[in-house]
Amino acid sequence: MGDIMDTFSFSRLSLYCECPERFYKKYIEGYEEEMTLPLAFGSAVHLGIEYVLNGDTLSNAVVKAMHEIDFHPEVNPNEVMQMISNAPIHGGNGIRGEIETHFKLPLSNEADAPKIQGFIDVLGDGFIFDWKTNRVPYKVTDTYQIGLYAWAINQMKRWEKVYGSLYFTRFRRESRHLYTLDEMEEARKWAYDTAKEIQGKLEILKAMPELKDELFPAIPSRNCSHCPFSVDCFIKNNQIHKYEDKKEIV
C-alpha cells in the first residue's frame, strides 16, 4: 500500500462514495482502468472544445482530439464533431473565459489538511462552466462538483457569489445555479469530511491490513455494469457468502 493520500479531486471523492472498493483498487493499489467508450468520447469532446476556444477550426479540433485519444476505435469522429458544434462556443456570443483553470487548495486551515484539486473547463467573469457528454442530464446541484469549484474560486478570487453551469452538449441543455457562500461551504465540508474519512481508514489499514474489505467494501449498484473490477468483485463476494453460509450450517 502506498503513502497516505493527501490530495483529492471531486472524481476521487465521488468514486469513494459510490464504491469504496473500486476507489481502493484504482487509487491506492494503482490498477489501470481501460479507456472505455464513454471516457474516450468525453475526453475527445472536452479536448475538441478546448482547441476551438484556443482558435482552432472545428475540423482541426476534431482531428487533434481524436489523436489525443489514440483514435479509439469505438469513438465516432462525426459524433465528436456534432457535440463540439453543440457547445455554445461559436460566434460572437459564444462562451469566453480562461480555459482549463487549475486549482489546488487545502480544505481547511489545519497544517496537515487534505487538499482538493481540479480543472475548471471555462472560468469567466463571475461564472464557471463545465462540459458534460452524459446520456442523461441532471441538475448542477445534484452533486457537489460545481459547488466545490465555486468554493475554490471564492478562495482564489474572493467572489462571494458564483454562477455555476453544467452544459450537456448532447442535448444543448444548460443547468445553472447561483452559488452562495453557504452552499460553497457545504461543498467544502463534504469534501473535507470525505477526505478525512478516507485518510482515517488508510491509517487503520497500515496497522491492520486484514480489515481492508471491511474498510473499503464493494457497494453493488447499476454502476457495476461499467466497472472493470465487477467480475472479480462478484467472484470474491460470492465466495465470502458461501463461506459465511457454511459457518452458519456448522
Image (cartoon, rainbow, N blue to C red):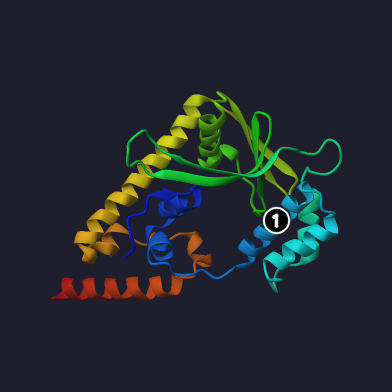
Instruction: Classify residue 81 as left or right of residue 165.
Output: right
Instruction: Residue at 83%, 35% (x, y): give it.
Output: 93
> Residue sitting at 45 percent across and 30 percent down?
185
Q: Is residue 67 left or right of residue 211?
A: right
Report the front residue among 207 and 144: 207
Q: Position of residue 182 (x, y in %)?
A: 47, 26
Tell me if residue 51 comes above or below residue 92 in the rendering.
Answer: below
Location of the C terminus by quadrant is bottom left
Given residues 138 and 169, the one toward you in this image is: 169
- Residue at numbered disc 1: 47
Q: How many marks?
A: 1
Find residue 98 and report its horizontal and vertical position in percent: 68, 40
Residue 232 in picture, x, y percent from top left: 40, 74
Quick one: label 1, few (<14), some, or many (20+) residues within 10 Å? many
Q: Relative to the observer, which residue lies in front, 113 or 139?
A: 113
Identify the residue at the far front of this view: 111
Residue 60 higher or lower than 120, as above or below: below
Disc 1 marks a residue whose amino acid type is Leu
- Residue 247, horizontal then vertical, whole percent: 17, 73
In this rendered view, identify the residue nearer to me: 158 or 220: 158
Q: Quadrant of the N terminus?
A: bottom left
Looking at the rendering, which quadrant does residue 160 occupy? Answer: top right
In the figure, 118 relative to 152: above or below? below
Q: Is residue 170 visible?
A: no
User: Is 65 positioned to the left or the right of 107 in the image?
Assistant: right
Q: Residue at x 23, y 55 (%)?
A: 204
Q: Residue at x 42, y 42 (%)?
A: 191
Residue at the farthest left position: 250
> Element type at marker 1?
helix
* Residue 19 visible within the image: yes
